[in-house]
Amino acid sequence: MSTGTCPHLPLRPLWICKRCAQPWPCAVARLALVAEYGADRVGLAVYLCGQLYDAAQDLHRLNPVEAPGPQALFARFVGWAPLRSPPALQ
């Protein structure tokens, strides 16, 4: 039996954080993803686009009338991610 804390992962098909119940990716999950992918911004973007695709299907299946639209889902899943690595310190 694990006594560790639950990581900030998505609870599907609701797409809320398993730990804090905020819409996933929550703030902590975003920080963890940026740290995990490091300078691999393309890898992070590809991963997030895959999550967006799955979330759009799940959320539409749960409630087609009130499912978030494409712009809201893009902002939530992809729009926040840094486009390029921060400049190296001199």
Image: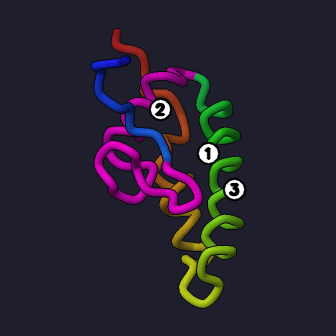
Is residue 16 shown in magenta? yes
Q: Which residue is mark 2?
A: 33
Q: Which residue is mark 1?
A: 48
Which numbered disc flags the more N-terminal residue, 3 or 1?
1
Residue 34 appears in which quarter of the rendering? top left
Residue 51 in picture, x, y percent from top left: 64, 49
Identity of the residue drawn at 58% across and 59% down: 13
Say which of 9 and 70 sits in front. Answer: 9
Amino acid of disc 2: Leu
Q: Is residue 11 above or below residue 29?
A: below
Counting every numbered tag in the picture gives 3
Residue 59 appears in which quarter of the rendering? bottom right
Give the magenta-colored segment's residue range.
11-39
Distance between the alpha carbons at the discs numbered 3 and 2:
17 Å
Distance between the alpha carbons at the discs numbered 3 and 1:
10 Å
Quadrant (top left, top right, bottom left, bottom right) of the C terminus? top left
Residue 24 in picture, x, y percent from top left: 44, 53
Identity of the residue drawn at 32% across and 46% down: 27
10 Å crowding of disc 3: few (<14), some (14-19), many (20+): some
Amino acid of disc 1: Leu
Identity of the residue drawn at 51% across and 57% down: 15
Q: Which residue is mark 3?
A: 54
Is residue 14 shown in magenta? yes
Which numbered disc flags the more N-terminal residue, 1 or 2?
2
Q: Is residue 66 left or right of residue 88?
A: right
Say which of 19 and 84 sits in front. Answer: 19
| Residue at the extreme top of the image, as rendered | 90
Q: Is residue 38 left or right of residue 46?
A: left
Q: Is residue 7 left or right of residue 71?
A: left
Q: Is residue 85 left or right of residue 88?
A: right
Distance between the alpha carbons at the discs numbered 1 and 2:
9 Å
Label pair 1/2, CB-CB below 8 angstroms = yes
